[in-house]
Image: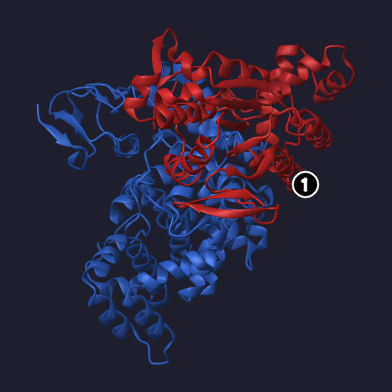
Amino acid sequence: MSLSLSTTSSSSPLLLRRTAAITDDEFREFRDFIYTKCGIWVDEKRKYLFENRFGKRLGELGLKTFSDYLRLLRHDPGREKELQQVFELVTTNETSLYRDLKQLDGFKAHILQPLLAEQRKSARPELNIWSAGCSSGEEPYTLAIMLHEELGPDIKRWNIRITGCDLSPAVVAKAKAGVYADYAFKTTPEIIKKKYFTPVPGGLKVAPHVAALTSFMTLNLNDTLAIKRIPKSHVVFCRNVIIYFDDAMKKKVVGSFYENLAPGGFLVLGHSETLHKISSAFRPKFISGAVAYQRI
Amino acid sequence: MPRIPIDAVTPGMIVAADVNTPDGRLVLPAGQTVGARHLDIFRRLGVVEADVADGPAQPEPDAAAVTAQLSEAAAYTRDFFAFLDPDHPLILALFRHVAEAVALDMARGVTLPSLSERRAVNVEHLADVMPMEIAAPARLVAHETELASFPDIYFRLKEEMESPKSSMTRITALISRDVSLSAKLLRLANSPLYSFTGPVDTIERAVALIGMDQISTLALGVTAINYFKGIPPELVDMKSFWRHAVSCGLFAKLLATAAGINTVERFFVEGLLHDAGRLILYKKMPYASTDALLYARENRTPVVEAERVTFGYVHTDVSKSLLSHWRFPSGISDGINHHHDPAEAADPVQAAIIHMADLMANAMEIATGNLYVLPPFDPAAWESLGIGLDRLPDILASFGEQAAKTVNAFV
């Protein structure tokens, strides 16, 4: 058999499509469904990506069309469980420890250290940090390590709560496990890696005294009531999360952050994100090349 | 066995030892012949040197060996088409072509990087020149053009082209004064871009054969490229960038010809400069650009969409500002500025050509270590070219034949 394009193309047609097709109507219905459930907005442009990802799920469930899947999500007795699958498929779960070092250094110098100095004056120094959209825990653990580095043995006197939350239960379970592969450490200083992680099957596990400062929960940022249960924060970290929301949802979520933050508390977004056009209830503060937002 | 730096490796050499990435991944097994595309892969993956030797090369794999790899090659390739309509005949045809090229490479023992191969580059030492809040395209362009002015020759050429006194002699004299420009133009005149019967040895001959207007257009493209300096290598390997640019230019020429439009030069230059706006973003906002690139990889989205999410605008918004500042001919700017939204162009068919050329060039690069999902496709743009699907194999074959020589004439 001679290997020429036309020969191969016509004799063994390779397919690009692997899953059921989603119609425009089905896509819109599904997109609206996801939006009402968790506020994540799936753009029309992502239709084929979406179709592929969820198409696989259809295959796993033995369903033929997306309409069947939507019916399941709306009416099947097991729909709550399946909704968790949807959440897992619709969110992105790739991140790393000590992500965006510059911003973390700026945070340490301009927000954290002054905050700690202020708290030290009190008889019971405390610190509450909320990591909203914590994925598999990298950010909360990074913050916990930073606190250990700042406070040293003195940390025993402190009441520190770092709350990590994410939409997907599967990913929150990973966060609780606290085990990370090599890639997660690409921007982590070697000395930190050695000091706070121990090798286990599957990667490196975070030290117990670091984990002790953290707690994880599943949370839907669309759920204002559930958010009220998060302890009042001195700092909220929400990096590269609200980019997945439309403007209305962004405003809603930032509004929740405002409610949750103690007056004068700080909101830290992703390095390239801005509150411009979303909220004027915060004052921008320059933290060495990055911007944080202080609750007015 | 000499261990030589990658820049000294040329196609045709045979590697004496396995070529690995710094991470230890095998890229090319011992005994294989290095092709131009391998050099591209090496650069993208951070390979710095290789053992080369003379000696018998491995035989090329037979058809059966390639077919055996086809399923895996297809799975690999499919990931890059995630944003595209899997049922569109053009997309399907492109997919099959690329899958076969990848299968051939796999049969040769080349290992291609997986989409999930994460290469977190450390860019902590780079800084954006201004905070995101104020980094609008016009501001970025102003910041850049304040510091570095566009090569003088371009403005003089432009003046010359617009002058009623312009003549072949004057244009030739002007170009000849710039040695590097002349050299590049001659290499282009002798590249597969043109099919002249004999070698083109002088600028006079080039101007006579190619035409005054056309050679000025080419000169414009060449001088524009020289403008872009100081782009952080952590973000982009410039050789790969220009390879993609030239490939896009070549596809633009092939598509224009297939569509019955014969002004080769303008399409080549538009293809060449279609992503120029991105270079400004990388240079001025390297930290934010890295966020965009990471977002693109993590979310399996095209880089242009990641730009939109990260910056609120895209690289063509930056090129709009830049090309307007340089007073580029509007005919050429239009195709560049609207290659992602050809329907919005003043001349949608022209922009459609660059749109398709970009898609095809990116598709070909899947087989050479491109890590990003293919950009969005506008079916109406393809329709507007009036090129039958049956012409595609010829276009792809011509590209295959001409790419290496055209790129070499340039980079």
Viewer-closest of B407 and A266 = A266
Q: Position of residue B307 (x, y in %)?
A: 55, 49
Viewer-closest of B372 and B243 = B372
Query: Looking at the image, which residue is at 58% across and 39% down?
Result: A239
Of the residues shown, which amino acid type is indicated by label 1? Ala
Identify the image quadrant of residue A194.
Answer: top left
Q: Position of residue B239 (x, y in %)?
A: 32, 49
Q: Position of residue A1 (x, y in %)?
A: 45, 20
Q: Residues within 10 Å of mark 1 (few under 14, many from 20)?
A: few
**Quadrant containing the N terminus of chain B in the rendered view:** top left
The answer to whether any part of residue B86 appears in the image is no
The answer to whether any part of residue A84 appears in the image is yes
Query: Looking at the image, which residue is at 55% across and 62% down?
Result: B134
Q: Residue furthest front?
A: A123
Asked if B10 appears above or below B345 in the picture, the reply is above
Viewer-closest of A157 and B204 = A157
Asked if B339 appears above or below A166 in the picture, the reply is below
Q: Which chain is red?
A: A
Query: At numbered mark 1, what does the secondary structure look like: helix, strand or loop?
Result: helix
- Name the colour assigned to chain B in the rendering: blue
Q: Which residue is mark 1?
A: A248
Q: Is residue A280 left or right of residue B215?
A: right
The mark total stands at 1
Q: Residue furthest top?
A: A201
Q: Residue furthest left?
A: B1
Asked if B318 appears above or below B401 in the picture, the reply is below
